[in-house]
Amino acid sequence: MTMNVPELFGKKVFNDAVMKERLPKDTYKALKKTIDEGTHLQLDVANVVAHAMKDWAIEQGATHFTHWFQPMTGVTAEKHDSFISPEAGGSVIMSFSGKELVKGEPDASSFPSGGLRATFEARGYTAWDPTSYAFIKDDTLCIPTAFCSYSGEALDKKTPLLRSMQALDKSAVRVLKLFGNEDVKRVITTVGPEQEYFLIDQEVYNKRPDIIYTGRTLFGAKPPKGQELEDHYFGTIKPRVSAYMKELDEELWKLGILAKTKHNEVAPAQHELAPIFSTTNIATDHNQLTMELMKTIASKHGMACLLHEKPFAGVNGSGKHNNWSISTDTGVNLLEPGDTPSQNAQFILFLTAVIKAVDDYQELLRVSVASAGNDHRLGANEAPPAIISMFLGDELEGVVESIVNGTDYHDKEKELMSIGAVVLPHIPQDTTDRNRTSPFAFTGNKFEFRSLGSTASISGPNIVLNTIVAEILDQFAEELEKASDFDSALNALVKRELTAHQRIIFNGNGYAEDWVEEAKKRGLSNLKSTVDALPAFISDKAIEVFTKHEVFSKTELMSRYEILLENYYKIINIEALTLISMTKKDIMAAACKYEYAIAKTINEKSATGIVGSSKAEKKKLETAAELVELMSERLEKLEADVEKGAAFTDAYENAKYHREVIFESMNSLREVIDKLEVLVPSDMWPYPTYGEILYSVK
Ligand code: ADP
Ligand code: MG
């Protein structure tokens, strides 16, 4: 059976084409205006849209609708309502009103709010985001919505993202006006998130409570074959995985998601999917849907999809590359060098703004990717370090250097270079020597922020990126608007700022040891763990920039900070409890059984009086006994540590305690378990090993 992709694509989406076809002309126009310009939608228009949406959804087999939203849990939430409405005589009709489309009132008391919503006013509300199309999933019409408290505070990941896009829009349009771009009405940010994941066999998954409860293995000795040979990267895709990827593509396409590339990643059982970029808001919704489908489709194929940042210690973790750019509604990518000197001057100003933003707000970018899961990855094997730095590539680096040094990029003889007159070198978009170790790399016409963890919503990092770049563009506009001579003011500004922010540019190996030293000398921050990073989120600087651009109010920031801390220590707590339970229940028993078996052998050997001294067995028994003692001690310590952890009332102190004490305590228990795993015979070891898990999909 061949697949007709163009026919399939967007089949389950109430997209522009469907709207155009099904809505009365003036309704379509009014809705389009709301979508494009963010104007308010009248209730009578909403009623007509709702009616058409319902009819369309029912034709697609839908019986229910839901407001689909993104609370602070990081996953999406939905509460399904059927379309039925009772009629006289005991029958029902299918109905859906404009009011139901526009606003919902889920009982929201159980979503994290960081103290924002006292339980007596636990009701939040959801509000339709018409900029993201409604779609059908699981016979339900899903309406993308924002989620707020009744007093208007954002309780979700969509609201601040939309606000940050607005902030950037405003500032960028302001700057573009200075370059005479009067036709530009709107500037949007675009994102293409590359998503990494692992696939393992469902049966193996079912046997590992740690993966089930925490998403990662809490112990496991290194397999004899890991990723040393790098033979998995871009390798042939196994038939089972290929069938999975095909179905995933098909389902994503039906949802209008531009799934483009798929390949095997570096680690065994690791894969990647990348979509074609879209508007940040939509890319974020789509990435959430992609992660959800990755999981549900995996189980249909008898596999489990692991999205955790570090499912296996010592094996590559999973991240998400956030390819980010800025475009005008007239179709110009502002991070792409243009064809004319004036376009290039504009490009250089935007580039300078991003460089300054990343340097000035490096801590905020770091916070935006901080999580318990990503702590295992940042700075670890084959991953971006916790230090934020930028890679520009040889061509741009040359341009920046010539501006800083006041030399012409092409004609080194000329003393002064006017930005407005510079002809930029051609910047290839797929330079092969790209620096893969840089956390923030320029890749021809966009920046690739690579520190994101694989599980997290991409909302957070993009909120920060949009906001900080909006702030710097505003600062630049402020200065340039006042200038009497635009060209010389522009030259002076660019030169001054590029000179001031040289420290953030680093073209070397970001994974090398000496970079840590060098970065320290440069004064770059190196916030190693989530606990180290989080306070930056509520620093004066953060509060100032977020409130100024109306992305977060101070109350919203404080509540989010609480939620992030809470989330962090809860995750570590669950991990600790899981490890305790697995050790107590099965690992201890297996180790004792092993000891007993050797002891028995020694006894029986000596009883026969035939064979020698049992030297080998005695040695084994000694090692095992020592490890069992140690395991017992460390288990007891972990249990006591967990108990102490329950006493904390301050969220930060609690998070810090979990990082410094419980996390370390878990690691030291794990160390013993991994040693035992190597000793105990396979038929006695209660859990699948790394080798068995990583090579479980045949
Ligand atoms: P890779 O980084 O793996 O070599 P590419 O550079 O081809 O892959 O693209 C990576 C991602 O960047 C894709 O999702 C692509 O759609 C996205 N991308 C390309 N152009 C832009 C842009 N202007 N804005 C945002 N993302 C973009
Ligand atoms: Mg990439």
Image (spheres, grey):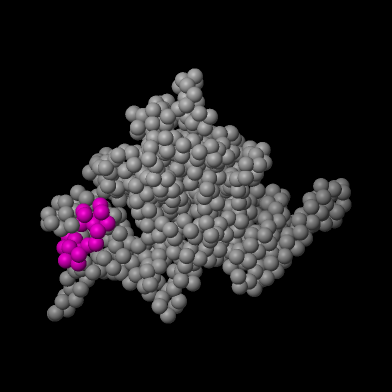
Which sits in the foreground, 668 or 131?
Answer: 131
- What segment is highlighted magenta in the picture? 31-52
Q: Position of residue 618 (x, y in %)?
A: 83, 52
Question: Residue placed at 16% from the left, 54% from the top?
Answer: 29
- Quadrant of res 76: bottom left
Q: In the current view of this chain or complex, which residue is farthest to the front?
A: 484
Q: Is residue 41 magenta?
A: yes
Instruction: Name the spot of residue 65 as percent of width and height, x first.
Output: 27, 64
Q: Which residue: 47% across, 65% down?
A: 554
Above or below 49: residue 524 = above
User: Looking at the image, can residue 527 be seen?
Assistant: yes
- The vertical placement of 249 against 229, above or below, is below
Tell me the residue at 38%/53% (across/down). Answer: 167
Q: Position of residue 182 (x, y in %)?
A: 27, 42
- Left or right of 252? Residue 62 is left
Q: Nearer the viewer, residue 630 or 377?
A: 377
Q: Position of residue 553 (x, y in %)?
A: 44, 64
Magenta segment's dominant SS is: helix
Residue 93 on the magenta span: no
Q: Measuring 24% from the left and 62% from the top, which residue is drawn there? A: 40
As rendered, which of 543 and 233 lies closer to the eye?
Answer: 543
Q: Quadrant of residue 246?
A: top left
Whether residue 632 is visible: no
464 or 544, which is in the foreground? 544
Look at the picture and state if 574 lies above or below 484: below
Res. 344 image quadrant: top left
